[in-house]
Amino acid sequence: MKRIAIQGIHGAYHEIAARMFFNQEEIEIMPCVTFKELFQKMANDPDLLGIVAIENTIAGSLLQNHDLVRKSGTVIIGEQKVRISHTLSALPGQSIEDIKEIHSHPMALMQSEEFIDSYAHWKAVESDDTALAAKEIMENKISGRAAICSRLAADTYQLEVLADGIETNKLNYTRFLIVADPGKADMMLKGITLNKAAARRR
């Protein structure tokens, strides 16, 4: 089983990208708080793969991540493009009228600005991660708060989706790189190619 380090927790868009890329394989997701932690874990464990957001339709190139990939000495073995679609999710039984605060990553808040602005009484609060915003609501049973997060995050943390597709730009994509230790890259590439070929024959 491949182990994939992601920035964020379960339900983050990095996990969506990983599951899309390795769609025919059983994988283990290894959450990391930061991209620096991700590359440190890879340095300590050459068998670990990483997936890193590198470019977004709205934000452009993520220069810090380009620099981290370069300095890490890892090898790019693939890429995955993901359309970023956000939900507004809250505790089951809540309605949009109950919501007073919206929590999410600053980028997700910006990407959903038109939707948020249509509810003038809402307070937008920045979080470190879209999925973390969802997890905190469920863990602490917080009424009156909603998260802007992926549907995967809403399902993972058993939140109710109050609105779907709330992103302003419906053509908003993020490109992710799959990276590996140089000594393991050829073996990983071979395995990926064989698995994708087998999937096409099914």
Image: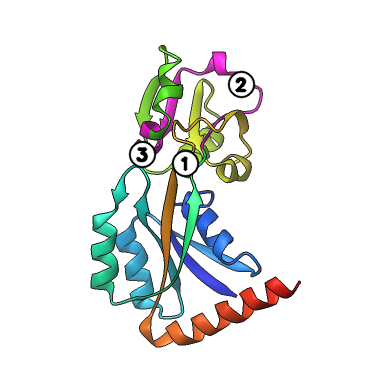
Say above or below: 104 vs 61.
Answer: above
Q: Can residue 7 be seen in this view?
A: no
- Expressed as whole percent of the image width and height from the top left, the position of residue 113 reads 39, 26
- Expressed as whole percent of the image width and height from the top left, the position of residue 57 reads 37, 46
Indicate the quadrant where residue 162 lies: top right
Say above or below: 167 vs 14.
Answer: above
Return the residue nearer the eye: 131 or 19.
19
Name the residue tied to disc 1: 171
Rendered residue at 66%/22% (across/down): 93
Q: Is residue 180 visible?
A: yes
Amino acid type indicated by mark 2: Gln
Rendered residue at 55%/64% (across/down): 21
Return the residue nearer the eye: 59 or 32.
59
- Expressed as whole percent of the image width and height from the top left, the position of residue 194 reads 62, 81
Label disc, if present, on residue 94 of the rendered structure: 2
- Disc 3 to disc 1, C-alpha distance: 15 Å
Label whose residue precedes the other's in the sequence (3 or 1): 3
Name the residue tied to disc 3: 107
Return the residue nearer the eye: 196 or 52.
196
